[in-house]
Amino acid sequence: MNKWLVSVSIVLAMTAGAVQAAGDAAAGKTKSVVCLACHGPDGNSPNPTWPKLAGQHPSYIKKQLGDFKAGARKDNLMSPMALPLSAQDVEDLAAYFSSQKRAPGTAAADKVAMGEKMYRAGNAATGVAACMACHGPTGIGNPGALFPRISGQHATYLEKALKDFRSGTRTNDTGNMMQGVVARMTDTEIAAVAQYVQGLR
């Protein structure tokens, strides 16, 4: 599984090229007024249960908003917020949030060792792939492959997202890759890697 993920990631990285939002960041800033209560005025959410959008790839933001609109991803707060957005609204919001600077996070010291091991090497004994195979050594992701930037993301949000993929509550990952990766992860491993990623920069 690890070798397969690495191979796929390399191919996607070579073919991805630069992916830019076609939207208007200034218009996106105006439209983001409805988003700031949860995600903050610059996309750095004050509540760790909600994701930081600052610095996220525009392609990934557009996919998630599209999935919320279409019902492929469900959330009691986000689904109704995304529903009325036009295609141009989505482009503009993606342009705005992707242009913002993500505030760095700090990892819990007692979870760094295990988190780093899971992120960089996975768990060969249980068949868990390394996170960096898709998200890169610094967690910057791959916009062409729709692999999000995760470095500096809130650990609380990441932990919930991983558990949602594991339980099947969330299924909008490309090719079911995340569901496959987390299927054999323990709660302890998930908590550790989430903390490590929070401090990754």
Image (cartoon, grey):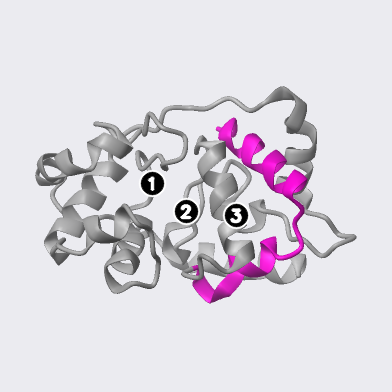
Question: Based on the displayed image, in which of its 4 quarters is residue 65 positioned?
Answer: bottom left
Q: In which quadrant is the N terminus drawn?
A: bottom right
**Magenta span main SS:** helix
41 relative to 189, above or below: above
Residue at 46%, 69% (x, y): give it.
172
Amino acid type at circle 3 is Leu
Q: Residue at x 50, y 65 (%)?
A: 170
Mark 2 or mark 1: whose residue is earlier in sequence: 1
Residue situated furthest right in the rendering = 125
- The residue tagged 1 is 56
Label 3 environment density (alpha carbons within 10 Å; few <14, some 14–19, many ≥20)? many
Q: Amino acid at mark 1?
A: Gln
Residue 98 x/y as whole percent: 31, 44
Left or right of 177: which side holds 101? left
Q: CA distance from mark 2 to mark 3?
A: 13 Å
- Residue at the spot of label 3: 162
Residue most extreme to the front = 76
| Residue 182 to residue 116: above or below | below
* Quadrant location, the C terminus: top right
The circle drawn on residue 34 is: none
Q: Give the CA separation, mark 3 to mark 1.
A: 18 Å
Magenta-colored span: 173-201
User: Which SS class for mark 3?
Assistant: helix
The reply to whether the C-beta atoms of the residues labelled 2 and 1 are less than 8 Å apart is: yes
Label 1: few (<14), some (14–19) or many (≥20) C-alpha neighbours in 10 Å:
many
Q: Which residue is mark 2?
A: 148
Under circle 1, the secondary element is loop
From the top left corner, tell me how far across and down residue 144 is, in percent: 42, 63
